Image (tube, rainbow, N blue to C red):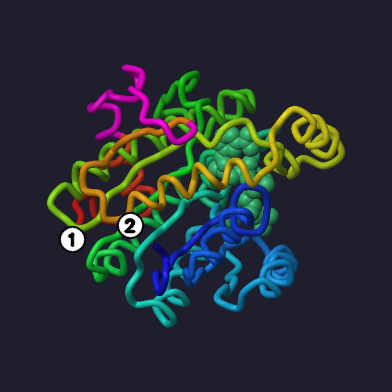
C-alpha cells in the first residue's frame, strides 16, 4: 500500500519508531526518519539501510523551533509531496527542563514540536492526492489535565507533564481534523500499547534503571509498530478523521479530551508560541 508513498516519521531512531520504519520500508515507502541527534540517526540508518535504501535520516531537536524550521526546509528539498506524516517521537523528562522558549520539555517534544512540524508540512501533505497524519498519543491522556497557564511551571511531576502532553496531542488531533474536514488530509491519534522502549532513557542513571524495568514489563516494540501502521493505513479512508484508536480499535474519548473550548485555546496558544497565524492558510 505504501509503494512510492512518501512518509515522514519522527522518533524513527528507536523503539516503536524504528520498528514502524522497518514495516513502512518493507511495504515500499520512501521514508524520512527523524532523530534528535546525528549520532542516533547514523546508528539507526546503519540498522535500516541494510534492509532497504529508501530511508534517509535528518537530525532535528523537536524541542527547538529553529531546528524544526530547518528540518522542514530540508524536507522541502527532497519531498515536495508528502503522503503520510507520523508524529511518533516522545520523551519523558523526570525533572523540569525548559526548552529554548521556557516551555517544559516533555510537553515541548511530545506536543508543541509536532504542532509546529505538522503545520509547516501541511502544504506538502495537501500536494498529495490523499494524505494522512498519525499522532502517536497514549492511553495516558486519560489522566491528563491541561492548564495552559502552567506550561513553564517547574512544579509538575513527570507523570503530570507526560499525561498533559498526551492529552494535548489528542485535543490537537480533534481540532486539526475539524479544520481539515474539507481537505484530502485526515488525522487520527492512537495508543500503541504498553511497549518496552527507551522513553525514560533521557534521565541519566535513574533513566537507565527505569528503562530496564520498562523493557521488562512492556511488549517488544514491533507490537507497538503494528498499531502505528494500522493508523497509517487509514490513508485514503475519509471515514476516519479525528479518531482515537487504542491498540488498533476505535475508542470513545473521555469528556475532557472532547472539550472544544480547551482544544481551541490550546490551538491558539500553540500558534502564538510558534509564531504562526491562528488560521490555516
Ligand atoms: N512505550 C510505551 O509503552 C508507549 C505507550 C504509549 C505511547 N507511547 C508513545 O510512543 C511514542 C514512541 O516512543 P517509544 O516508546 O518508542 O520511545 P523511544 O524508544 O524512547 O523512542 C522515542 C523516539 O523519540 C525521539 N525523540 C526523543 N526526544 C526527541 C527530541 N527532542 N527531538 C527529536 N526526537 C526526539 C527519539 O530520538 P533519539 O533517540 O534520536 O533521541 C526516539 O527516536 C512516543 O510518542 C510515546 O509517548 C509509548
Image quadrant containing the C terminus: bottom left
Does 5 sit above or below residue 275?
below
Asked which secondary structure carries label 1, the reply is loop
Q: Residue at x 30, y 60 (%)?
A: 131
Q: Is residue 98 visible from the viewing direction of this image?
A: no
Mark seen at residue 281: 1
Name the one closer to the observer, 114 or 96.
114
- Is ligand 1 within 8 Å of the beta carbon of the residue shown at mark 1? no
Name the one closer to the observer, 45 or 208.
45
Q: Is residue 177 visible from the viewing direction of this image?
A: yes
Image quadrant containing the N terminus: bottom left
Q: Is residue 223 left or right of 237 when viewed as pictured? A: right
Asked which secondary structure carries label 2, the reply is helix
Q: Which residues are magenta?
A: 247-265
Snapshot quadrant of residue 221: top right
Does 24 sit above or below residue 17?
below
Do the residues bearing badges 1 and 2 touch, measured as CB atoms within 8 Å? no
Q: Residue at x 47, y 51 (%)?
A: 87
Does 6 sit above or below residue 248?
below
Q: Residue furthest left?
A: 182
Q: Is residue 251 magenta?
A: yes
Q: Is residue 270 left or right of 45 when viewed as pictured? A: left
Mark seen at residue 119: 2
Residue 99 location, x and y as percent? 57, 48
How far apart are the two marked residues, 1 and 2, measured between alpha carbons? 10 Å
Amino acid at each position: 500500500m505504501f509503494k512510492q508513498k512518501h512518509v515522514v516519521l519522527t522518533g524513527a531512531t528507536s523503539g516503536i519508531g524504528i520498528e514502524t520504519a522497518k514495516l513502512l520500508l518493507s511495504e515500499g515507502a520512501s521514508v524520512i526518519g527523524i532523530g534528535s541527534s546525528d549520532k542516533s540517526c547514523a546508528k539507526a540508518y546503519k540498522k535500516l539501510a541494510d534492509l532497504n535504501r529508501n530511508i534517509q535520516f535528518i537530525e532535528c531537536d523537536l524541542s527547538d523551533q529553529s531546528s524544526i524550521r530547518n528540518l522542514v526546509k530540508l524536507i522541502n528539498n527532497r519531498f515536495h509531496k508528502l503522503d503520510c506524516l507520523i508524529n511518533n517521537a516522545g520523551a519523558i523528562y523526570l525533572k523540569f527542563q525548559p526548552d529554548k522558549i521556557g516551555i517544559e520539555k516533555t510537553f515541548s517534544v511530545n506536543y508543541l514540536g509536532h504542532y509546529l512540524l505538522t503545520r509547516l508540512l501541511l502544504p506538502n501533505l495537501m500536494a498529495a492526492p490523499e494524505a494522512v497524519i498519525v499522532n502517536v498519543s497514549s492511553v495516558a491522556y486519560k489522566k491528563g489535565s491541561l492548564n495552559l497557564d502552567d506550561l513553564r511551571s517547574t512544579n509538575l511531576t513527570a507523570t503530570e507533564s507526560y499525561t498533559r502532553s498526551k492529552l494535548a496531542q489528542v485535543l490537537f488531533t480533534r481540532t486539526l481534523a475539524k479544520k481539515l474536514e474539507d481537505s484530502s488530509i485526515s488525522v487520527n491519534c492512537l495508543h500503541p500499547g504498553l511497549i518496552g522502549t527507551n522513553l525514560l532513557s533521557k534521565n541519566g542513571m535513574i533513566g537507565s534503571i527505569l528503562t530496564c524495568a520498562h523493557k521488562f514489563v512492556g511488549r517488544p516494540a514491533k507490537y507497538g509498530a503494528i498499531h502505528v501502521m494500522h493508523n497509517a493505513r487509514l490513508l485514503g479512508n475519509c471515514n476516519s478523521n479525528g479518531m482515537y484508536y487504542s491498540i488498533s480499535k476505535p475508542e470513545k474519548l473521555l469528556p475532557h479530551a472532547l472539550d472544544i473550548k480547551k482544544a481551541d485555546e490550546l490551538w491558539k496558544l500553540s500558534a502564538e508560541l510558534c509564531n504562526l497565524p491562528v488560521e490555516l492558510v
